[in-house]
Image (spheres, coloured by chain):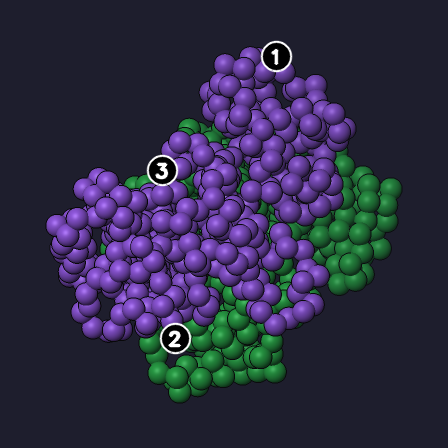
Amino acid sequence: MDSEVLRQKLEQLTGKRTGIKQLGRQLSASLFRIGKQDEPVFYEDKLLVPLYESDGRVTVVWVEMEGLTPLEVQLTDYAARNFAIALQATGVKEEGEVEARQLGSWLNSQLEQEKDDIEIPDDIALKGRLFGDTIPFLLSSENVHSPQITYRSLMKLLRSYFEKEILLIPLLEKEWLILARKELLTGGDDKEDEEDNEDDLLAQTCMGLHELIASEWVGVFHLAVAPAIVPVKGLTGSVALLRETIVLGRIFQVGEYIHLPWELHLERLVNSIPVVRRRQLLGQIGDYTSLLADKEMLLTLETFFEMDCNVSETAKKLYIHRNTLLYRLDKIKQETGADVRSFSDAAIVKLTMLLYKVTKRK
Amino acid sequence: MAGVRLEHIFKKYPGSDKATVIDINLDIKDKEFLVLVGPSGCGKSTTLRMIAGLEEISEGKMYIGDRVVNDVAPKDRDIAMVFQSYALYPHMSVYQNMAFGLKLRKVKKEEIDKKVREAARILDIEHLLERKPKALSGGQRQRVALGRAIVRDPQVFLMDEPLSNLDAKLRGQMRAEITKLVKRLETTCIYVTHDQTEAMTMGDRIVVMYDGIIQQAASPEQLYNEPTNLFVAGFIGSPTMNFITGTLSEVSGAVRFRAENLDVEVPGGKAQIIRNKGYIGKEVIMGVRPEDIHEEPVFLEASPNTIFTSLVDVTENLGHEMLLYLSGLGGGTVIARVDGRSTTREGSKPKLAIDMNKIHLFDKESELNILLG
């Protein structure tokens, strides 16, 4: 049972508003005896039952007091204590996993209902830590054979890497949201870094993080990063964007594992076209089937577009002679009538390639 | 240290029609420097990434030492990787970048410090230890990435195009340094490159890949002198091997190769193989390396049956050698590499001769080397 389920059950049982909250260090110290088994307290018209303490902050389950019977208070205390004991037995309490799972579960339910602009509500325990500028990363593991990824081991790795406070939110079974403070982009103290292109910095940070997690931990997984947000307001939208980015990356960037939303605008557009319409469009544009089924030609075109249709740079990137590239481009023109050196033809061929990839026309 | 063994390895991405890597079998010996080489998209990086554990293996078994590692996480494979993109940790200093992997493995601080400084000394980056990656040049970043791998003291080094972001001069320098370093560390190394010069100069053994398949795995010398097929023959060597399509025929007890403006005799040993394999009367592709076409009078005198005349379209004098671009042989351009002091000029029609002992003949359909095996 995760903390969100506990909250829901208590709410059903008592009929009162209920929530999980991590208290600040000061309030924790004034209400509870840190590090010791403690009794529930009444505070600001709420019953607070302590679940556990981490780094001086006590996490409580709270229930609105008004009209609460003594029996309901006892039952609440009993349920919360059992939950805390069960947590202790699994050894997850010190890592803040409960609050993280509560937020993850809330995010999942919002996104299932396609609500991607909802502010984090007060009953989310971590809300107090979601106000600063934060960079969201979404990690989606692909390992079929590897052992189960644990929250504790990933959190430990990330903490030692960032050396700053981060949040790790488990979403789906193999999907994790990482929230890191924006200062990590600049190292916190380098003023001149602020002038650097933020997209480049995000891409570099993503590459470093991917390298770390891949080599030191899990192996095969996809990683996406989105621009900095203030999570309390923008988290649902950002997670929706990151999920979409990974879905698009899996379709359009086969063999790549780092996906950046600002590099997938066209792909997003093509993916939003209904399947039937896509097939119609492919039929209307012309027959590119044999061209796009030819691995060498496909790689040539992809590289040509990646290099902004620059012949010399493309030849260099493909490690082929310029004349070989020109021969291939002429061959494409002969076969399809499209001269990719002209903008309009290049645009059509690029769109056709994307449509072809997403429909996987044989 | 350990060897690496790949048994019937396949890689197929979800949704794609064809496998990217097809039935790879390789036995890489302990302390061997193996180079995977091939054009873009041939599957060499994917193979390396499977060894690293960064790609799932679709089929087959992968061993490091005696252990099957298909399901072993990268961190537990005792390997160290260096990539083209040298993904350094941007918010850490060079020292921290190099020390981080050891810190995670709970190595003692003093030991980490010793290893990092020793690696920094070997790579000549001691003065950069306090800098952040963004303050480094491409070459310096690549050295840091190498340093990060060295301090791990792994069983196997995996390197994926580690030099391709560097300029030509630095590449040459780093090429020699990596070779020296790997020999000194006595570690197995698997190195991926598209560059045949890198492959030929660095590898104890080279694996040429194309279209997801191993075309040939052999020593640099064997690959150059005994290519198993047309692809390998054309891929290794610069300028590339000349290919001339023609017919083999038996004339007065000798086997001759005839093509447009060319009629030369095949030496006895090779002629016997051609007869035995039934290629008389068939069209084949002859492969001749540019350096096996001669213009020295002594050679012409000794090889009267392989002399031909051709128009020189272009000459390129590189100082120590001259390249002659000959037209009309077998309908295409043929390149000859002659002495830099040659007096042959553009527009002339010199007499030249082919060293027929060094030629290769390929089946036109299967593209396999007829003269091998």
Give the residue type at disc 3.
Ser
Tag 2, which chain?
B
**Badge 1: few (under 14), some or many (20 or more) residues near its Cα, within 10 Å?**
few
Question: Is disc 3 in the same subunit as disc 1?
Answer: yes
Which sits in the foreground, A362 or B128?
B128
Tag 1, which chain?
A
Q: In the picture, residue B187 is in which quadrant?
A: bottom left
Q: In this view, does B45 lie to the left or right of A47?
A: right
Q: Residue at x 25, y 73 (%)?
A: A33
Tag 3, which chain?
A
Q: Say whether residue B206 is visible.
A: no
Residue B106 in the image: state x and y as whole percent.
Answer: 33, 76
Distance from Cα at disc 2 to Cα at disc 3: 39 Å
Residue A318 in the image: state x and y as whole percent.
Answer: 62, 44
Give the residue type at disc 2.
Lys
Q: In this view, does B165 lie above or below B249?
A: below
The residue labelled by disc 3 is A109
Tell me the purple chain: A
- Which numbered mark, 1 or 2, is in the foreground of this view? 2
The residue labelled by disc 2 is B103
Q: In this view, does B84 lie above or below A235?
A: below
Q: How many marks?
A: 3
Q: Which of marks 3 and 1 is nearer the N terminus?
A: 3
Distance from Cα at disc 1 to Cα at disc 2: 59 Å
Q: Say whether residue A309 is visible.
A: yes
Question: Is disc 2 in the same subunit as disc 3?
Answer: no
- Which numbered mark, 2 or 3, is in the foreground of this view? 3
